[in-house]
Image: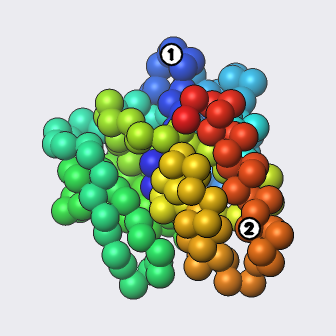
Amino acid sequence: MYRTVLPRCTIFGSVEPVPYCHFLSGAVPNKCQHCKYLFEGSCRRAVDQVQNYLSLDHGPCPINGKTNPILVETQYYKSKVFVPEKCCSCKHLELDRIRGFVCNFERERWGHFPRTLDWGAWTPEQPNIGLESGRSVSLEVLQAVAAKNEVHAIKAFRTSHPEVTLREARDAYSELLAQLEKYGG
């Protein structure tokens, strides 16, 4: 789930909730209210890099604990999902139909725009990158691309997306390799 948060927001300002309405009502962090990256309750700060919108920066979670990723296998996802260790047993961890796992701490203040999970200072080994096609990129694919192991990357990509052609898988590998080189992999 860290893929909806990284790269982190670098805009400083208050994260106090301010009313926001886009089809649904709720609140967004004050610093996001007039930010050029705000788009329909999400953030466009790294669209070119991740090929998707990111979550807004709600600031750190007040609940203390470790933020290293822990693998969670659930009935909701067939794929492997990572959440911060402190969130695994937290009563505020909830599955949102659109956003995946979110934090519902202070739900009454945020409404339909819930807090994101708090990853603290933890950073993954590889930068968060995506494909123009919008297809998901597993950690296994990213690791294989970083190791420049095209064969393993293609196998892992086709395992995640069995309907893709070999050509599409090779193109995905090339695109991800270029993205890694561009964004510091």
178 horizontally vs 117: left or right: right
Q: Is residue 48 above or below residue 161?
A: above
Q: Nearer the viewer, residue 43 or 2?
A: 2
Q: Is residue 155 visible?
A: yes
**Please, what secondary structure does the residue beneath circle 2 have?**
helix
Residue 150 x %, y %: 63, 59
32 horizontally vs 76: left or right: right
Residue located at (57% from left, 29% from top): 184
Q: Nearer the viewer, residue 116 or 168?
A: 168
Tell me the residue that label 2 is attached to. Answer: 169
**Please, what secondary structure does the residue beneath circle 1 have?**
loop
71 horizontally vs 146: left or right: left
Task: Estimate how packed mark 1 is, as few (under 14), some (14 to 19) or many (20 or more) residues with alpha carbons within 10 Å.
Answer: few
Residue located at (58% from left, 79% from top): 159
Tell me the residue that label 1 is attached to. Answer: 13
Choose the circle earlier in sequence order: 2 or 1: 1
Pair 2/1: label in front: 2
Q: Nearer the viewer, residue 19 or 92?
A: 92
Task: Estimate how packed mark 2 is, as few (under 14), some (14 to 19) or many (20 or more) residues with alpha carbons within 10 Å.
Answer: many
For the residue marked with disc 2, what is the amino acid?
Answer: Ala
